[in-house]
Amino acid sequence: MNRIHFLRACWEDMIVIESNGLFAMVDTGTDLSTDQILAYLDSIGVKRLEFILITHFHRDHYGSLPALLERYPVGKVYMKTFSGLNIADSAGRPADQAYNEAELKKCEEMCETARRVSELVIIDETVDQVSVGDFHFQIYGLTDAIREMYDDPASPYHGKICFGENVNSTAMFADVNGTTVYLGGDAHNSELEYPKYTNQNDQYAKLAGRQIDLFKVPHHCCGNIFNEETLKILKPRYAVVTNFAKSVNGQFSGNRDLLLQANPEVTILCTDLCGYMFTLGPDGELSYEEIDPWPEDREKPAWML
Ligand SMILES: [Fe+2]
């Protein structure tokens, strides 16, 4: 049985990979979601995680990592470390030097814990293929893109702190029985004046070079998620946006329209009111069901209504 579980979340990523009784996680939500994650993992019988991948060092992706490392044996931790030069925090507020220093310290502490209780793999350039059950993953990293653009005297960004940590997002392709899944953290396209890192999502996606069955859309939905040329190749069949539907149909509708243009049959799901569990069948068939609904006893915030 091969499944991918996108837990209910808004502006957070917490994705569980399941293959024949083995489990792994891609991003761990904020620390405010720890109880929700642990309860969900208990409900599906998780006793161990083969790996946890942190796509980039923002709180909405690394937040529950310490609790998960405390609760479960974890085979490996793949970590995209913090650049130390973040212009904005994970909520988009300006990040000052104190914020960056505190985040650097937190990143070092988490790496230290991961080294102690698991095996830490720092994501830099491409990480070799990793398998969990029937899933075969390719993890693509960058060198510290922000640091490189900041330090290179030939860079138009030399000496300027002008990027958010999303630019450092790694991307992962998962292949299982002929189905391709693209999990890209908060990687998104931007027309940087530094060719090596421009249009990051396109660069990652072109590595797949074929239709993507399931695409985790970066929840910020900023810029174009892919350009039209890339979308002609990828034509996602399902797109999961870890953001609220109201926003995807409103201020971020440009990206919704891009997905529909690439594949008028695309199913777009938003994780604000419930999560989704995809089952990936032996012959490439894909189906999903709703999971992890918004708790009845918990009031919905106004922006959801
Ligand atoms: Fe994020």
Image (tube, helix red, strand yellow):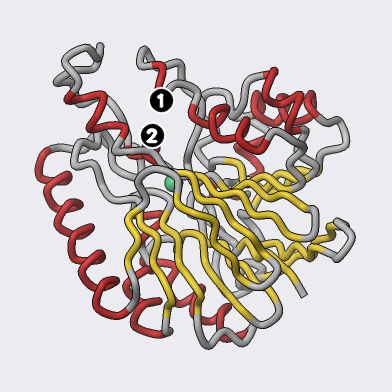
> Amino acid type of disc 2?
Val
Residue drawn at (38%, 68%), measured in percent from left and top? 64
Residue at 77% over, 37% down: 211
Mark earlier in primary sequence (2, 1): 2
Disc ID at residue 197: 1
Tag shown at residue 72: none
Spatial distance from mark 2 to mark 1, Cα to Cα? 8 Å
| Above or below 196: residue 132 | below
Going by the numbered disc 1, the residue's amino acid type is Tyr
Task: Decide which of 229, 239 is in the foreground and name it.
Answer: 229
The crowd level at tag 2 (other Cα within 10 Å; few <14, some 14-19, many 20+) is many
Residue of label 2: 167
Task: Classify residue 111 by image quadrant.
Answer: bottom left
Q: Is residue 15 left or right of residue 81?
A: right
Q: Name the secondary structure under disc 2.
A: helix
Q: Are marks 2 and 1 in contact (CB under 8 Å)?
A: yes
Quarter of the image where one finds residue 271: bottom right
| Quarter that holds the N terminus | bottom right
Q: How many marks?
A: 2
The residue depicted at 12 percent of the width and 48 percent of the height is 101
Q: Position of residue 252 (x, y in %)?
A: 60, 30
How many C-alpha atoms fall within 10 Å of the one at disc 1: few (<14), some, or many (≥20)? many
